[in-house]
Amino acid sequence: MHGLNPQQRAAVEHCDGPLLVLAGAGSGKTRVIVEKIAHLIASNRMPAKRIAAITFTNKAAKEMRERVAKRIRGDAAEGLTICTFHALGLKFLQIEHASAGLRRGFSIFDSDDSTAQIKDLLPTGSKPDVIDAVRNLISRAKNACLSPEQAMREARSPREVEAATVYDLYQQRLASFNAVDFDDLIRLPVQLLEADEDRCLAWRERIGYLLVDECQDTNDAQYRLLKCLAGPRGLFTCVGDDDQSIYAWRGANPDNLLQLGTDYPTLRIVKLEQNYRCSNRVLRAANTLIANNPHEHLKTLWSDQPDGERIRIWECREAGHEAEKIAAEIQFIAASKTAPWSDFCILFRGNFQSRALEKALQLQRVPYHLSGGTAFLDRGEVKDVLAWLRLLANPDDDAAFLRAVQAPKREVGAGTLAKLAELSAHAHMPMARAIENVGALKQLPPRAANALDAFSNLVRGLRAKAQVATPAELVREVAERSGLLASVRAQCKDEASFQRRKANIDELADWFEGGRGAGPGELAAQLALLSHADKGDAGNQVRLMSLHGAKGLEFRFVFIVGLEDGTLPHEASIDEGRLDEERRLLYVGITRAKERLWLSHSKMAQRWGEVLRLKPSRFLDELPGAEIQRDGADPVADAENKKARADAGFAAIRALLEG
Ligand SMILES: Nc1ncnc2c1ncn2[C@@H]1O[C@H](COP(=O)(O)OP(=O)(O)OP(=O)(O)O)[C@@H](O)[C@H]1O
Ligand SMILES: [Mg+2]
């Protein structure tokens, strides 16, 4: 345990009762979790297989696994669970599926599937914002662990009544498809556990000690799951920072941190005050900014790192200019400090902001990795394979059937599918089962019936294969035998673009952990849980990600773009007076920087063909003047600056060459 400060050590050694580590950014909270896992195992307090550490994203889970692997040698860590709340919920349901009314191989509907169902249940022609509102209300009810009946009882406005009605129908659909949605992965375990003390005891036998990172962003359902699993003895360590609560919009409730004290009177609270991550200027700027939020107890973080360079604030003409400046600066610093690309990170508020950055980085040949864009998982061929896997695992999954049967296109048109939907609804069976029924096929046009029959045989063959193949084999087999690969080839203009799309399918195969016969359901479930921002290995590339996706990470050089009123803080947050959360978001961004930080904003933007004048973010005025250096949007000064930097860059390269 050497290298920990006394507070960290106290947190690691407190093993017999509930513990909350409440501390600011970069103070070593996540490090405490890793050390504590090692300590629990090494001191024989708890075998690895009875320890579960919960992280906020799969990426964070992967990182923690790597840190633990470095920390614990040999096989002592075998059986340790490190995953997200959702993955834990999935594990629970895979074991307890029968009690939840699910059959083995149940599907997880992603948010597109859920939206499609909700849209279908609302009156035809409902506007997207109505669909969104209803979806959010249903999600909120689920996060509060309300059943449809309870949601109906609590509904106040006509919209809430409508949402509760749809919620009821939506659950019936999910049940008939043998499917759950993301929210159910938490809600159902909570329901089952709260209703059955014996089941709680059994699970506490399985999970003897819980550790939760980023606890400020748990929602109410997750908090209840934590309580059920930890039991009255409260064998857990939660770590969090109320100043980094940035998911209120998704139902996160930072008051859960306080609630822990009420629910567990013996809760021990440890505070950490030394920041080990940021240069002192960066840290002072972060402290000053966050002091503008209301606090009961202001945490003051200190650091014994050097002051470092001033924080740069760049005023740019527009987003393209901003992106160019950043790309040039990265080139310059990478060359002059011989820093790898992976030391740089560019953070933005909204995904639309990444386009200008990508363009500039490409032009200047800076390799980058964009996470957060669901780009990979949204690619057609990837979604197609996923639909196939789901259908192989779960014949009742109509959403997967509808996608797979058209991937690739076969002689089954929309009219036939509508007719089939009608027939199967009539017969109370899912579509994939209906086509195995000769009577149903006879009522369809012969060519379509033949195509469906062949499809059905194919599914059967692949299902058998799934029992014995490795995940990678299965993915490739599906791509080949379904005809997907051939159809992708036919769509591509040249070999290069075919190889690029084929590479997506190969990459998909690489994503899966798990050995032979893991089963398509397990695979599809794993993939469904890989939410945005999650694919780990970006290699030696500049990282581009949203501020939300940057939680818990650290980089030597950090750029935050778009510091304009309306972007950060976001327009809707200004209108609705939710500035505190936006300020926390910027606080998260600033505290990612270990060495240097740049904040930039544009004077103008093109939106919908109109030129808008932008105002610098009000948060810039809240930063301490002494830590800042402002650079203007003056083209002449810019050009001079650029030339000076180019000269310096050349000098640096020359120096390198000369050894
Ligand atoms: N006692 C220590 N001595 C030296 N370095 C430390 C110590 N504790 C933590 N660190 C380092 O400080 C950095 C931040 O630690 P960590 O990521 O655990 O902080 P955190 O509190 O989880 O931050 P965040 O709030 O951003 O999630 C890491 O690089 C970590 O290795
Ligand atoms: Mg952390």
Image (spheres, rainbow, N blue to C red):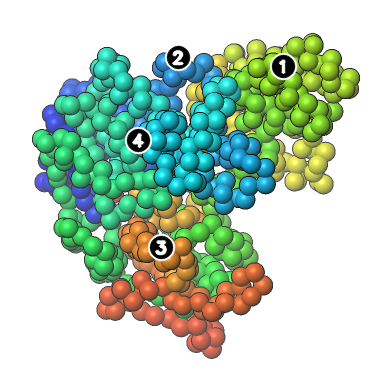
Circle 3: element type: loop
Residue 434, labelled with which disc?
Answer: 1
Task: Using the image as rendered, state which of residue 653 and residue 610 is in the foreground.
Answer: 610
Residue indicated by mark 3 = 576
The residue at the point 84 percent across, 21 percent down is: 444
Question: Residue type at mark 1?
Answer: Ala
Q: Secondary structure at mark 1?
A: helix
Give the vertical position of 626 relative to 463 (above or below): below
In the displayed structure image, the side of residue 238 where residue 378 appears, left or right: right
| Identity, as a three-letter code, of the amino acid under mark 2 | Ala
Identify which amino acid the numbered label 4 is placed on.
Answer: Ala
Q: Indicate which label's residue lies in the foreground, 4 or 3.
A: 3
Residue under the point 31% across and 54% down: 244
Residue 311 lies, with reference to residue 155, above or below; the image says below
Q: Secondary structure at mark 4?
A: helix
- x and y percentages locating residue 164 in the rendered image: 48, 37
Q: Earlier in the sequence, mark 3 or mark 1?
A: 1
Can you give x and y, in whole percent of width and height, for residue 404 in the image? 70, 29
Whichever of labels 4 and 3 marks the residue nearer the N terminus, that label is: 4
Q: Residues within 10 Å of mark 4 (few under 14, many from 20)?
A: many
Q: Residue 604: image x %, image y %?
A: 55, 77
**Res 313 quadrant in image:** bottom left
Q: Is residue 391 shown left or right of residue 368?
A: right
Of callouts 4 and 2, which one flags the residue occurring earlier in the amino acid sequence? 2
Residue under label 4: 221
Residue at which label 2 appears = 98
Tell me the distance, in whole angstroms, between the alpha carbons under discs 4 and 3: 25 Å
Residue name at image x 31 percent, y 46 percent: 253
N-term mark: 4 or 1: 4
Q: Give neighbour class at mark 3: few <14, some 14-19, many 20+ (Cα, 10 Å).
A: few
